[in-house]
Amino acid sequence: MTRASLDKQPHEVASMFDGVAANYDLTNDVLSLGQARLWRKEVAKAVDARPAHKVLDLAAGTATSSLPFAATGAYVVPCDFSLGMLREGKKRNPWLPLTAGDATRLPFKDAVFDTVTISFGLRNVQDTEGALRELYRVTKPGGQVVICEFSQPTWAPFRTVYTEYLMRALPPVARAVSSNPDAYVYLAESIREWPDQPALAGLLQKAGWSKVAWRNLSGGIVALHRGVKD
């Protein structure tokens, strides 16, 4: 797959996720060897939602990621650009205010949310910098952004093994458990091409976020980035 093939139009990416919505959460658990649940717990700790807080959960998919925030009494808005994902999420959690939205043109007013968070979705937005600015726009002064995204393992030998897993093992496993395995070939390639931890931190700072920091999870397979709006 060439780099050009990653430059899918938004409707193409949305359609791709529509096709995997039904088994999306199960597939993620299998492909991550169970680590996905651990990563969600770390995101919940970082967000630190509480009653009366307003949380935007962007790229929420079926809204599984939104449930820990809602359980604290916070008002959480699961938002995604895949209508298929939102429909599946609405079946499972009809009480949540699932909202269709594009990360670069969010359907919310300025300075609405105490926390904006996105897990494993920023990588699929064509205009990363535009999305980070848009997240900044809808966050209240003093509010925070929490980004959980695949990154680069910090130990070089493991990084080589990990890359081999992504490109060779992930597609056949996806064929066994996913309704649309081609989507996971795309995802593997997008992970390999994604900026490393310092590069993403730089993009956050460029978009206006301050106090930017990150923490590696699972040896850097995933990184949890945070920033504050002054």
Image (cartoon, helix red, strand yellow):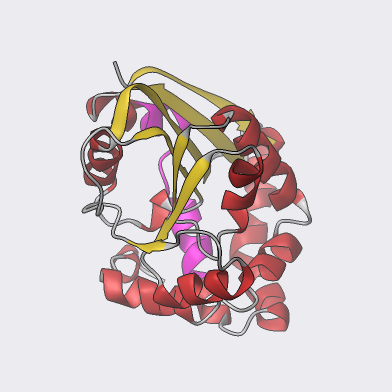
**Taken as a whole, is the magenta stretch helix, strand or loop?**
helix
The reply to whether residue 186 is visible in this rendering is yes
Q: Position of residue 38 (x, y in %)?
A: 74, 43
* Relative to 197, residue 86 above or below: below
Q: Quadrant of residue 209?
A: top left
For the C terminus, the image quarter is top left
Quadrant in which the N terminus appears: bottom left
**Magenta region includes residue 2:** no
Is residue 199 covered in magenta?
yes
Q: Nearer the viewer, residue 96 or 125?
A: 96
Q: Position of residue 73 (x, y in %)?
A: 60, 39
For residue 32, side relative to residue 64 (left or right): right
Depth check, front residue: 186 or 79: 79
Residue at image location 56% in from the left, 35% down from the top? 223
- Quadrant for residue 32, please give it: bottom right
Q: What residue do we see at 49% from left, 76% from top?
A: 87
Tally of numbered discs: 0
In the rendered image of this protein, does residue 153 appear above or below residue 64? above
In which image quadrant can residue 64 be found? bottom right
| Location of residue 66 with respect to 144 vertically, above or below | below
Percent coordinates x, y for residue 148 in the rendering:
53, 41
| Residue 169 visible (yes or no) | no
- Depth check, front residue: 59 or 215: 59
Judged left or right of residue 66, residue 143 is left
Range covered by the magenta-colored residues: 184-201
Q: Position of residue 29 (x, y in %)?
A: 73, 61
Please determine whether, in this image, residue 60 is positioned above or below residue 9: above
**Residue at image location 49% in from the left, 54% down from the top:** 191
Which one is in front, 202 or 142? 142
Q: Residue furthest right?
A: 34
